[in-house]
Image: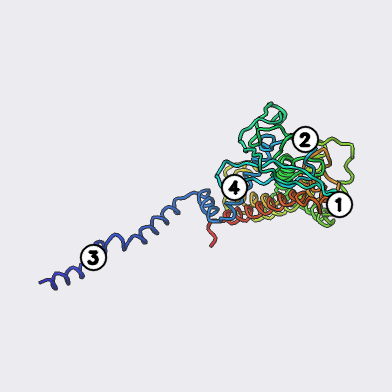
Amino acid sequence: MESSIQKRWYDDASYEDALPEEENWAEDASAGSDKKVDVASYGQLMWWRFLRHRMAVISAVLVILLYFVAVFAEFVAPYDPENTFARYKLAPPTAIHIMDDQGNLRRPFVYRMDRTRDPETLRSIYTEDRSLIYPIRFFVEGPEYKFWGIWESNTHLFGLDVDREEQGIFLMGADRLGRDVFSRMCHGARISLTIGLVSVVVSLVLGIVLGGISGYYGGIADNIIQRSIEFVRSIPEIPLIMGLAAALPTDWSVVRLYFGITLLLSLIGWTGLARVVRGRFLSMREEDFVMAARLSGSSEMRIILRHMMPSFLSHIIASLTLAVPAIILAETGLSFIGLGLRAPALSWGVLLQEAQNLRSVALAPWVLLPGLAVIITVLAFNFLGDGIRDAADPYAK
């Protein structure tokens, strides 16, 4: 009896529908995932593909933090970048503790720093006086500043509730004049990071306009623009940048010198993007959707901006992301050798001028930390550019 019932059960075509839910779970999940992908927009596919690139996601968070510091440098920096601590010249990075000598867990704090001199070398030696503890406080009142030259405030992200003549906190040490290196790096990030964005925006406008004209119209315009690009690219880039930077007047103000360096780097960096845009326009101007837009009466500007540009906008964004670190490195190199920004301007390249003094490097290797900030920023932008470039083609395997 039981065997005949089991036989009819196995022979029934509805057997697969009666399988336990656990056995069909993987197939159902896969089918649901496929349906989700099928109805997803191109932007959603790019976002999902970007999230799979873990280094790109980490780099994106790091880039956001760097630009947060650049925008809110006065708030993040505990001291004015030009304030000097006479008692703490070439002081090493301040050690932050969370446990005292008795083994008690406390809020982050620092010990008092005492300064002595080596009788033979006259080198300053800093030691901790463990009898005095200074807690680190957040949103503490400190030196007054004008945020972006508009709002007055004296609130800083962190600091000590003591006079700076008595004790200071130096996360990255102090330079030979007793200025806080961390505060100077925060303010230097504003120029070093924004000069890359501004230069890339100018290069973007020049590259799209000239590359679009060259690729879309062709003819004499294409020949003139392409010969100009070949002429610029035939000149060695480093000597060209150094020569043009050296030609800038030395009596210019910081603002004029900033925009001069920005324009200089933009005029040299637009050629690569222009060639990319030209190639894209050449390949798409005979496509069916472009011909349909022409036949429907759309203007040429509308065809370029509404039909052709969005089709390779993601590729342009990836190219620009990879171009930003090159601009940052160029500005840092020019400022380091004295051909770019100069004091009193603050950029990571200007701060690295302290490393030209061998004595300072030997006694205070932390003056090289602005170079480490440049390396981290360049790597973050490169990983971010790789992630955006992969996400730009979400259908690739």
Q: Amino acid at mark 1?
A: Glu
The answer to which of marks 3 and 1 sits earlier in the sequence is 3
As drawn, the label of residue 83 is 2
Badge 4: residue crowd in 10 Å (few <14, some 14–19, many ≥20): few
Are dots 2 and 1 in contact, CB under 8 Å? no
Toward which corner of the image does residue 2 lie, by quadrant?
bottom left
Camera-nearest label, 4 or 1: 1
* Residue 259 in view of the camera: no
Q: Amino acid at mark 4?
A: Val
Question: Image height check: is 134 above or below 121?
Answer: above
The answer to which of marks 2 and 1 sits earlier in the sequence is 2
Residue at mark 3 to residue at mark 2: CA–CA distance = 82 Å
As drawn, the label of residue 61 is 4
Camera-nearest label, 3 or 4: 4
SS under mark 4: helix
Residue at mark 3 to residue at mark 1: CA–CA distance = 93 Å
Camera-nearest label, 3 or 2: 2
**Residue nearest the observer in this picture, 353 or 253:** 353
Question: Image height check: is 254 above or below 279?
Answer: above
Q: Which residue is mark 1?
A: 120
Are dots 4 and 1 in contact, CB under 8 Å? no
Q: Amino acid at mark 3?
A: Tyr
Camera-nearest label, 2 or 1: 1
Q: Which residue is mark 3?
A: 15
- Identify the residue at image location x=14%, y=69%: 5
- Identify the residue at image location x=64%, y=49%: 317
Residue at mark 2 to residue at mark 1: CA–CA distance = 30 Å
Badge 3: residue crowd in 10 Å (few <14, some 14–19, many ≥20): few
Residue 200 location, x and y as percent?
Answer: 72, 46
Residue 85 location, x and y as percent?
Answer: 78, 37
The answer to which of marks 2 and 4 sits earlier in the sequence is 4
